Image: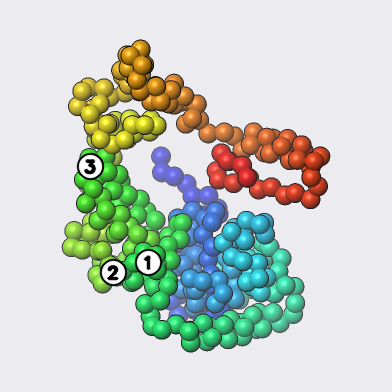
Amino acid sequence: MPRIPSPSTSPCPTPPPESQALSGITLHIIDAKLDPKETGEMYTLAQSTGAKLSRVPQLASVLITRLTMRRRLERHVSWDVANTKHIVSPEWLRTCAQQNKLLPFSQFQTIKTAAGSRRGSLARTTMDTIQDSVSIGASRPDHKSSGDHEHPLSTHRHSPLFCPNQELCLELATLVKARFLEGEFNSELSYSRAIATVKAYPKKIEDTRDTRNLPYIGPKIQKLIEEYLKTGNIAEARKAAASERFQVLSLLTQVHGVGAAKAREHYAAGRRSLEDLRKFYRAKVEAGTHLGIAAALELHDELNTTIPREEVEAIANGVFGELSAVQLGCEYTICGDGETLQ
C-alpha cells in the first residue's frame, strides 16, 4: 500500500514562479526534526516565493524550525543571534505560499524572541541582516570561503542533517555499505565523498548538469544520479540491498566485535545467522577465548531493543527528583532518540 503523507509533510501547492510574496525576506531553515521531504519542500517554497536562503542564521531575518524549546534551539543557533530573529514553524512558509502574501509571524511563532515582540521588527531585523551581510561579506576573501558547496574540502561545506537530496544520498549510502561489507575501501571512499558533496548542495538536483562541476562527482556517479532522476532509484543499490549476502553480512556486523572482514569469514564458512554465531562462539568460550563476542551475542536482542520515550521520561524525572534534593536550580535535557540521557 502506498504511504499516505501526514498533513505536516504533505507538499502544498506552490505559487507561480513569478511570485515575489516574500521578496526581501531572508530565511534560514533549521532541519532538526524535519524529515527529508519536508526539508526539500521548505527549500522549494522559499525559492518559489521570492525569498532568499541563507546557510548561516546570522544573515537571515526569519528562522524556520519545528523546535519549540530554547535549549534545543541553542544547539543549532546561539541565543544572541536567535533573539534578533523571527522564529516560526514551517506552516508559516506553507501558508504564505498558499495565500501568496507575507503573513504576520505571531500566530506561527514557535519560540518567543525580542525581534518577535516589537513593532516594525521585520524591517529592523532585515536592515540589521543587510548590515551584517555587508560586514561579514567584506571579511571574506573569495567565494571559496566556509560553506561553499563547491569547495573541495568537506570541512568547508555546510552539510545539514537532512538535505534537499536526502533520498538520493540514501541510495548512494547503500552502495557505500555494500563496498564496506566487501572490503572495497577505495570504492567506499569514493561513494562517501560523493555523498558528502550531494549533501552540501543547497537545492534539489533536477538535472545532471547541476552536479557536473561539483567535486568528487565523476562520470560513474553522474550516471547513477541520472538513473536516479529518471527512475527514482538506483538499480545497483536496490539489487545489493536485496541480496542474501548483503543482508547476512549486515546482520553479522551488528554484533559487537564482528567487523566486515570477520563477517565475510563466517559467511564463507556457512555461519549465516546469529544462532550459527552463538554455537561457534560457545565452543570458543569453552576453550577460554572470544569471551567478549560471546557476551555481545547473549545481549544482542536486549541491546537492539529501543526504550520507549515514556520510560526514558520516567527515569529522567526520578533522577531529577533525587538531584533536586541535593542541588537546586539544575536543569536536564533528554538527548538522542530517547536512548540516552544528559
Instruction: Determine which of the numbered discs, if any, sits on residue 29 in the image.
Output: none
Query: Which residue is at 59% across, 76% downward?
Result: 61
Q: CA distance from mark 1 to mark 3?
A: 29 Å
Instruction: Determine which of the numbered discs, if any, sits on residue 183 in the image.
Output: 3
Query: Is 39 above or below relative to 97?
Result: above
Query: Is 18 above or below relative to 293?
Result: below
Q: CA distance from mark 3 to mark 2?
A: 27 Å
Q: Nearer the viewer, residue 206 or 19?
A: 206
Q: CA distance from mark 1 to mark 2?
A: 9 Å
Of badges 1 and 3, the one in the foreground is 3
Instruction: Say how many tags the image has.
Output: 3
Q: Residues within 10 Å of mark 1 (few under 14, many from 20)?
A: many
Sequence order check: which comes first, mark 1 or mark 2? 1
Q: Which residue is mark 2?
A: 214
- Asked if marks 1 and 2 touch (Cβ < 8 Å), the reply is yes
- The kind of residue tagged 2 is Leu
- Looking at the rendered image, the quarter that the N terminus falls into is top left
Q: Position of residue 6 (x, y in %)?
A: 53, 49
- The kind of residue tagged 1 is Tyr
Of badges 3 and 2, the one in the foreground is 3
Kind of element beneath mark 3: loop
Q: Position of residue 339 (x, y in %)?
A: 56, 39
Query: Which residue is at 55% across, 45% downward?
Result: 336
Sequence order check: which comes first, mark 1 or mark 3? 3
Query: Which residue is at 49% across, 73% downward?
Result: 53
